Amino acid sequence: MAAFTRIAHAPILERGAIAQADLVVVADDTLLNEPAAQPLAGCDAQCTLLVNSTRDAAALRQTTSHDGRLLVVDFTALALDLTQTLASLSTALGTATAHVIGLALEDNLAGLNEELDDAQLSPAQHRANLRLAQATDALVRSWEPLQERREATVVLATPLVEVPFDPPWCAAPSVYAAANSPARHTCSWRQFRPVLHPEHCTRCWVCFVRCPEAAITLDRDDFPVVDYDVCKGCLLCVHECPTHALSAEKEVR
Ligand code: SF4
Ligand code: SF4
């Protein structure tokens, strides 16, 4: 799996390759047989494959090895028709996916509305995306939602490597390590400081990974800790935090 979209606020407790997908969504059918992408690796007959393609299901069957359920729509044409941009393709794919996993249309639209607000689209594009979601839902409404797996089978086209789990704080960079510059305290540049509200933190470590100053480390419970001697106040962590667990507070000193 190369990318994902969050549809829940629950903490992500497992990461990495998915050995046995129930649903695989392919936004570009030229990837189906691409050796570097291998989107069908690990798919078995119980996996549903949802593809954006100009070809129909029968034509795609002949060129893929997938023997499970195959759902095909030309989402590109639909997105272009209703929004005049391909940037909205994920609205259509997300809506079709939401239907397949059994999410109600009103819940999907509520989430989409929030994302579109965050994306700060023009009101016209915002409305066009909602129309696209409704049109997509009408198109896929007859599709059956995913069924429970009948049995667990593991079919791996590519062997996965088991790696031992190391606690993430081990990977924390350190400005105090040899050859770094601990004496250069960039804290004096700061007009605002990032402040953590742990009750909203899901320990996703986006802030820890993205901080350009390595000013964020993790404590033994994997919560981020800001080193205010080093933090220069760029607020990248505040903007990137997906749950708004970091706020920007004016420095008063
Ligand atoms: S404000 Fe910038 S420098 Fe400070 S912790 Fe956040 S990302 Fe790092
Ligand atoms: S503060 Fe935000 S970005 Fe950082 S670990 Fe917590 S939820 Fe993730």
Image: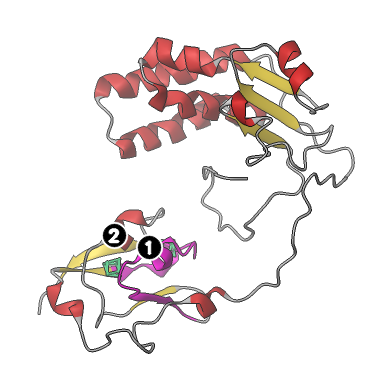
Which of the 4 image quadrants contains residue 166? bottom right
Q: Quadrant of the C terminus?
A: bottom left
Give the spatial CA distance, label 2 vs label 1: 8 Å
Give SS at disc 2: helix
The residue at label 2 has a CB less than 8 Å from ligand 1: yes
Q: Is residue 155 above or below residue 221?
A: above
Residue neighbourhood size for the residue with mark 2, other residues' Cα within 10 Å, grouped as few (<14), some (14–19), many (≥20): few
Examine the image and state in which quarter residue 101 appears. top right
Type of residue at label 1?
Answer: Arg
Amino acid of disc 2: Leu
Q: Residue at x 36, y 67 (%)?
A: 197
Residue 55 visible in image: yes
Q: Are marks 2 and 1 in contact (CB under 8 Å)?
A: yes
Residue 84 x/y as whole percent: 35, 15
Q: Residue furthest front?
A: 35
Where residue 198 appears, x then y in whole percent? Answer: 41, 69
Question: Does residue 243 belong to the magenta stretch?
Answer: no
* Region rendered in magenta: 195-219
Which disc is residue 210 wearing?
1
Of the pair 145 and 34, the residue shown nearer to us:
34
